[in-house]
Image (cartoon, rainbow, N blue to C red):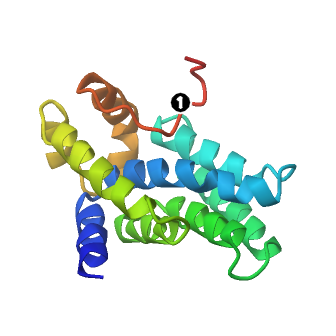
Amino acid sequence: MADLRWLNAQIASLGLPLASWFAADCITRVLPYYEEKFPSDLRCRDSVAGLGEFLHGRSSLDHLHAAKQEAEAARWGAPTSSRAQIAASSIAVACSFDAQLNSNACALARRLSGDEQQWQAERFWVFKQFTSQEPLRSVLRTTGRADRVTRLLPFIADSLYEVGYAPLTPDPLNDD
């Protein structure tokens, strides 16, 4: 339990937008739990894509909010306490663009499989290594307010790729 609290605190301490990038990686991994139960329902997939669009700087907070509402609607349509409902909840919470809530999205994802905690801990270590390098570190020191962060999202996305961190959340406009 202490390890889980430590991981939650570490994810939240990343601040915006890095906690959102990390949460996006987590929800990309839990999407199949929803799609397994509801293969023709694209709301959660569209929400993950909406978060990716936002993190790549190609949509607004209003679009991210709409993506969150879609995932919340999917959550309410899933059986209570099912893996599909937990996955949809995790996706909805990740679309909040709030560091603490993004940490909670990762915690929800850990409820779905035994190996998720280990994966998140290992992925966090890699993420932390890459995000502590320049030029990303200097950019992140200048941010803080959500409006400043959202203007820098395309640069942060490019910087993550430049330093070698390949987010699992795909660039929706890049088919590579």
| Location of the N terminus (image quadrant) | bottom left
Which residue is located at x 43 percent, y 70 percent? 107
The x and y percentages for residue 172 are 60, 30
Count of numbered tags:
1
Regarding mark 1 in the picture, which secondary structure is present there? Answer: loop
| Left or right, residue 110 beside residue 83 | left
What residue type is disc 1 on? Answer: Asp
Task: Farthest residue to the top: give it.
Answer: 176
Is residue 142 visible to us here?
no
Give 77 or 138, whichever is nearer the viewer.
77
| Left or right, residue 63 beside residue 15 | right
Task: Farthest residue to the right: give it.
Answer: 40
Give 144 or 163, whichever is nearer the viewer.
163
The x and y percentages for residue 169 are 50, 39
Which residue is located at x 40 percent, y 32 percent? 154
Which residue is located at x 37 percent, y 33 percent? 157
The x and y percentages for residue 159 are 28, 29
User: Which residue is denoted by mark 1 in the rendering?
Assistant: 171
Which residue is located at x 53 percent, y 54 percent? 27
Image quadrant where residue 166 sits: top left
Is residue 96 visible to us here?
yes
Q: Residues within 10 Å of mark 1 (few under 14, many from 20)?
A: some
